[in-house]
Image: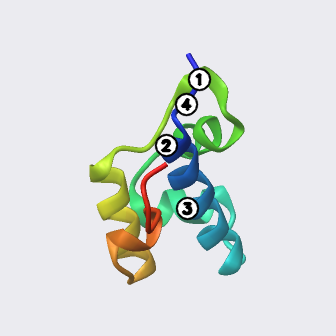
Amino acid sequence: MALADIEQYVIDKVRAKRLELDWTQEDLSAASGLSQGFIGDIESGKRGKKYNFKHVNIFAKVFKCSPKDFLPDHPF
């Protein structure tokens, strides 16, 4: 099952923030408490996995930003 545009948007925003800080998936895993395999599966598009609002909130804490930073300004 293909991801919805908004789900892919969130994945891309989290990846962009991670890369902006020059973090590896392992770094994000250690900071967030999520497994490296889970993050890797999401970023690679395997198995249709996606982040949920709980994950977005965790990333906002880790990156010291607003959860809104991972969401689009306008609906798709």
Q: Amino acid at mark 4?
A: Leu
Label disc, if present, on residue 2 of the rendered structure: 1
**Measured Cα–Cα span from mark 3 to mark 4:** 15 Å
**Measured Cα–Cα span from mark 4 to mark 1:** 4 Å
Residue at label 2? 7
Q: Position of residue 27 (x, y in %)?
A: 59, 65
Q: Reading the chain from its start, which is encountered first: label 2 or label 3?
A: 2
Provide the secondary structure element on which disc 4 rests.
Answer: loop
**Measured Cα–Cα span from mark 3 to mark 1:** 19 Å
Does the CB distance between marks 4 and 1 fall below 8 Å? yes
Q: Amino acid at mark 2?
A: Glu
Does the CB distance between marks 3 and 4 fall below 8 Å? no
Residue at position x 41%, y 65% in the image: 59
Provide the secondary structure element on which disc 2 rests.
Answer: helix
Provide the secondary structure element on which disc 3 rests.
Answer: helix
Q: Amino acid at mark 1?
A: Ala
Residue at label 3? 14
Residue at label 4? 3
Does the CB distance between marks 4 and 2 fall below 8 Å? yes
Foreground pick, 27 / 19? 19
**Measured Cα–Cα span from mark 1 to mark 2:** 10 Å
**Measured Cα–Cα span from mark 2 to mark 3:** 11 Å
The residue mark sitting in front, 3 or 4, is: 4
Residue at position x 56%, y 16% in the image: 1
Foreground pick, 75 / 24? 75
Q: Amino acid at mark 3?
A: Val
